[in-house]
Image (tube, rainbow, N blue to C red):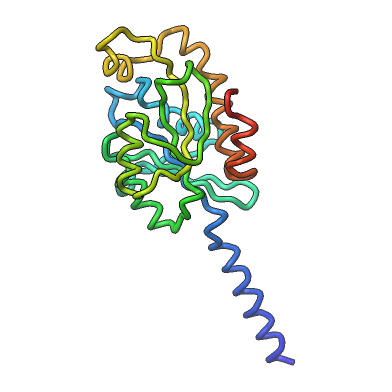
Amino acid sequence: MFTFISNLFKSNTAHFLVEEQDPMKKFLIVGLGNIGPKYEHTRHNIGFKILDAFAKKEDLTFTTQKLGDLSTYKLKGRTFIFLKPSTFMNLSGKAIHYWMEKEKIPLENLLVITDDLNLPFGSIRIKTKGSDGGHNGLKDTQNTLNTTKYNRFRFGISDAFSKGRQVDYVLGEWTDEENEKLSERLDKSIEVIKSFGLAGINNTMNSYNGK
């Protein structure tokens, strides 16, 4: 009798450990941006801004760790690991690869959040693959992961700049009009992240693309 109970306990314990470590229930959500106050409120840092808005809403705290600031959020049996790389935009892939390996995150559970000049301000486009579109953060991620097939969440910043002023525009701060609309857009972005973990990438694309 004792042997039966002992074996049953071991069996249940093993099952519990498998549940706890199930990689399919862990997600790496990466907001791209540049570190430092100089870049904090720039359009290029929308990835950081979305994760900061999520942290504020859910009372989360970021801690500085290797290659970035991290925070963890749990929802309905899922674990979301938020990463703001400290490598600067052009070396984003280094931090992403490191934390994917360390946390054993499968590629399909990675979501990279970035700004997009080709989309109207505040619009959302989620994709499972694609080119870097000239974005240095995505370019380094693609080169480091050696694939273009990873989930990305593009947040539109529009292309309202004159010829030759793209860098100034991207690294410029939001206008007063944009700031007034950002709050609602950030709330929508938080919904996207939760949906990615709970409903999956395909349902999330169907629900939020173009919204």
**Residue at image location 33% in from the left, 47% down from the top:** 65
* Residue at point 43%, 16% (across, down): 158
Q: Quadrant of the C terminus?
A: top right
Image coords of residue 78 (percent x, y) = 59, 50
Q: Is residue 113 left or right of residue 188?
A: left
Q: Residue at x 26, y 35 (%)?
A: 90
- The foreground one among 94 and 8 is 94
Q: Residue furthest front?
A: 131
Near-viewer residue (165 or 180) = 165
Residue in the picture at 46% in, 29% down? 154
Query: In the rendered image, which quarter contains the N terminus?
Result: bottom right
| Circle count | 0
Image x and y of residue 40, in percent: 34, 24
- In the image: residue 85, left or right of residue 129: left
Q: In the image, is residue 22 above or below residue 145?
A: below
The quadrant where residue 87 appears? top left
- Residue extending farthest left: 164
Q: Position of residue 143 (x, y in %)?
A: 30, 45
Q: Is residue 72 above or below residue 152?
A: below
70 w.r.t. 135: above or below: below
